[in-house]
Image (cartoon, rainbow, N blue to C red):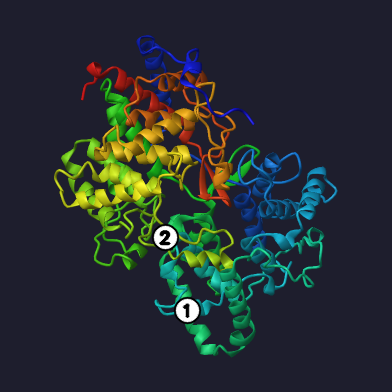
Amino acid sequence: MLTETTSASSLGTAAIEASSIPSSLDNAINKAKTQLLSLQHDEGYWVFELEADCTIPSEYILMMHFMDEIDEALQAKIANFLLSQQSADGSYPLYKGGTGDLSCTIKAYYAMKMADYPLHATHMKKAREWILAKGGAAQSNVFTRIMMAMFGQIPWRGVPYMPVEIMLLPKWFPFHLDKVSYWSRTVMVPLFILSTYKVKARNPKKIGISELFITPPNQERNYFAHVKTPLGRAILIVERMARLLVEPLIPAFVRRKATAKAQDWFMQRLNGYDGLGAIFTAMVNAYEAMDYLGIPADNEQRRIARIAIERLLVIKDDLAYCQPCVSPIWDTGLTALVLQEVDKYETNPQTQLAIKSGLQWLATKQLRDEPGDWQIQRPSLPGGGWAFQFGNSYYPDVDDTAVVALALIQANDLKFAENIDRAGVWIAGMQSRNGGYGAFDADNDHHYLNHIPFADHGALLDPPTADVSGRCIMFLARLVNQHPEYRAVIDNCIAYLRKEQETDGSWFGRWGTNYIYGTWSVLTGFESAGVPKNDPSIRKAVAWLKNKQRNDGGWGEDNYSYHGNNIRGVFYTSTAFHTALALLALLSAGEAGCPEVGAGVSYLLKTQQAGGFWEDKNFNAPGFPKVFYLKYHGYDKFFPLWALARYRNEITPNRLQN
């Protein structure tokens, strides 16, 4: 492993004196800005690819075989992509450069087998041997076992008991839909139908994967070996008793009532061409459930549901993959903030037009009177949030709302006043009891639910996190002069963030990799809220950031840092994304003149590509820490530009125009 720390004195060769920067800095900023402006769509938005691990493209092939809707040409391109992502040992990791993951490798193997790759092919043989060495397919995660049960590869006793009657449970019951996150609700409700009725994949080629099991699936007795906690084992006993004793006694009319309620729930939330929850897994579950429920293929809602899934595809000449979702609101909001920072230096008509167009598009996407599941926690709270995707009316995103609303504030345009006011009311109202903010829900912190057998991914909930909370006060602090009622909200959030600071000075990053991301999020929030630069929390964070700078002047963090406190801050290589975040964090803390910032700027200038952008290979965010990771393809394009522009504005304040 490369060394991860360096001292300020060793940065001398990498650092650039401020007096020598402007020409090279201006050139770098202009090149990146020009490229970024060229990617704006005619409607005003920006959207970049959002890549996940190989489970999602594998599941796309599996879906085609489940439904017997096989597009051979598309399947071949996806299989080519899967082959290109395989590690040398035959496995498939959850992020580039990571260790192999059993469940991901099983799905990729099954998908490639369905795509007619022969078993004797080298990559198939290596994947199969790797899977067997890890204990075989029986040791896979819950979602993979559910897939295998539907394809007839394991018995249904190998998956958690999830009767559709869960839909009828009262709110006071320990498990209720209202107690889990939005993504869990949208995935689970159609899955209740598929699991309850043991829906079987069509699988027209009758392809199986019996060769991936050490013990024959019908003889396997250790499908739930992953349940290790006392609470988890107790719940597993109750679940098994319910499967054996309660399931046979459920009256037919109760099952019909529960099924109808589940169907009504997800059909009401189908979300048009953006799909259920606007996330792939929920969309596929809904589409397959619609088929089982007898909704014909020419039904308009079912047809649109299929198109919504297709819209997630990224298709190239000889490769294709499927995105887990799309991120236009997030990408456009952040890009607007970046361009606003760039344009502080020298107002440019083209840049101003791009910002105006982007903000006008964003303003039309605010969710106001639409129904939403967030109203379960806050029934009297008026709408005012933004989603993450093009459309997701039931599920506005707290993080996106804070970013978009801040960009609207900085536009200093009265026509956005109502959008901003609504966003302020909504953000303030979504605060959890502990002072922090979740991404979509308030007080979604019933942690005992992560012990149920279904929740082996540990991501059933949406509790408050430091990174989202930091951006909420970043936004609300800009409104507090006009809305003094937000002062208590901000103070409570700052108190929460102080409690969340790690002993080494960093903050955890739930939605971006990882401690650098979390620390940037909080320090920008503290700056906006007016927390003094000499505050002990800020100084401790600054010391941590400086200590984590690498000898080349950059910063970088691996997703492996999510896998335990004892390995927090694993830094294998510098990235433009992490270097930009570290610089933005240090600049928020008043560190523009320190040698570490100069060295970081030098790193970005040296690593900029000829076209104007930067190129990181790394996955830079978790979907769910430890089990699902993402690469935002925009992060290595606009975050470095943001950092360079902010630095330029800090060292040349006399040249600022506004």
Estimate the x, y position of residue 536 in percent, counting from the top left: 33, 37
In the picture, measured across the screen, residue 462 lies left or right of residue 284, that is left
The residue where tag 2 is placed is 271
> Closer to the camera, 84 or 245?
245
Q: Quadrant of residue 535?
A: top left
User: Residue furthest toward the top?
Assistant: 20
- Write down the quadrant of residue 477 in the picture: top left
Image quadrant occupied by the N terminus? top right
Give the labeled residue for mark 1.
260
Q: Secondary structure at mark 1?
A: helix
The image shows residue 135 at horizontal and vertical percentages of: 76, 57
Residue 226 left/right relative to 468: right
Residue at image coords 42%, 24% = 32
Rounded to the nearest angstrom, the CA distance separating label 1 from label 2 is 19 Å
Amino acid type assigned to the residue bearing label 2 in the image: Asn
Q: Nearer the viewer, residue 266 or 403?
A: 403
In this orientation, does residue 517 appear? yes
* Circle nearer the N terminus (1, 2): 1
The location of residue 396, given as percent across then percent down, is 35, 55
